[in-house]
Amino acid sequence: MTAAVAGTEVIWPLIIVLGASIGTLSGLFGVGGAFLLTPALRILFGIPFITAIGSDLLMITITGGLSACKYKRAGRVDVKLGLLMAAGALPGVQLGKWLLDLLDSGAQTFTIAHGEFSLLDLVMKSLFLVLLTGVGISIARESRGKTDADAEVQTGLSKRLRAIGAGPSIELSDGSGSLCIWVPLCLAFAVAVLTGLMGVGGGFIMLPLLVYVLGVPTHTAVGTSALYVMFAAGFGATANLLTATPVGAGNWQVGNVDLLLVAFLFAGSFVGVQVGVRLAEKFGGAKIRRYFALVLAAGSLMIISDLVLTITGVTGGGGH
């Protein structure tokens, strides 16, 4: 039960299971799930980062769209805010894609103890580890000890940003007031750079930004994040589809996207999204944030384990 994906033989039922897990996260947290999917494909299945990134972006465009539609029907999406952030994401994705191509073009390898890493592998694993750990710790510290009765957050920063009166503003759908449009535009641009560079929809960063920086209620933030992910990942997927197909790629690969890999992932994620959205309806805001922090911690541990095994020479390096 194997298939050739990006020049690598993989057990395809396990890819479907991975897709189902990521789809559940997408529905539950309003994130694309590529913050775990991209490193998991590289670490667990040996798929090159460049192909994992392009394929992930196409897959999470689909799952993000499914999640956003479900949340829109439930009235839990701030459509104007989500579309505004999507506009800010387009130039950020282009910048991130340029940085990715720059890293992938480098032939440098680095030896650390007994392990050898390509430049792209070393930079990607380090970035994923720093972001997952940092965001996870921040959310865990804030949500610890809170109940759903005091689930929502109004930080000093969100109050100050809400008070900015310069320039045009946008009325938030939750009725909590208005917000200068330059704030979400700049945040979306910064997050979108990571989308283009790391193949992540950006939801794992956008969700806490919406909650803690913009003061959006958690359940609305989840749905709005899903809408943003759909557009940001879509921009990135298009850029990767239009890239020249790598030499030696399989028959199913277009640019940096392996369509067979996307099909396997989507087969699982379609079911997972339905499960995740139903679970989100049962949990309060504080509980959702605590569970999200645990998921981020699991991703950090996966990357740390891989780095340790590679450095100690137990597994091969990330040279391909």
Image: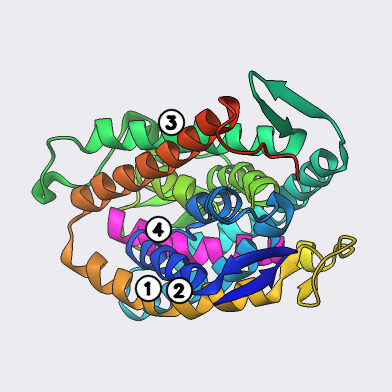
Q: State the image quarter where residue 3 is shown.
A: bottom right
Disc 2 versus disc 4: nearer the observer: 2
Q: Which circle's residue, 1 or 3, is located before the other in the chain?
A: 3
CB atoms at circles 4 and 1 under 8 Å apart? no
SS for tag 3?
A: helix
The tag on residue 269 is 2
Which is nearer the N-term, disc 2 or disc 4?
4
Left or right, residue 266 beside residue 9: left
Colouring style: rainbow
**Above or below, comparing residue 75 to residue 150 in the picture:** below
Residue on which disc 3 sits = 134
Q: CA distance from mark 3 to mark 2?
A: 27 Å
Residue located beneath label 1 in the image: 272
Quadrant into which the C terminus falls = top right
Classify mark 1: helix, strand or loop: helix
Q: Earlier in the sequence, mark 4 or mark 3?
A: 3
* Location of residue 202 in the rendering, given as x and y in whole percent from the top left corner: 54, 51
Quadrant in the picture for residue 105: top right
- The reply to whether discs 1 and 2 touch (Cβ–Cβ < 8 Å) is yes
Amino acid type at mark 4: Leu
Q: Nearer the viewer, mark 3 or mark 2?
A: 2
Is residue 315 rendered magenta in the image? no
- Give the residue type that dot 2 points to: Ser
Dominant secondary structure of the residues highlighted in magenta in the image:
helix
Please provide percent x and percent y for residue 23.
Answer: 42, 68
Three-letter code for the amino acid on which mark 1 is drawn:
Gly
Q: Which region of the structure is painted magenta?
A: 218-237
* Marked residue nearer the N-terminal end (4 or 1): 4
**Distance of mark 1 from mark 3, alpha carbons?**
26 Å
The amino acid sitting under disc 3 is Gly
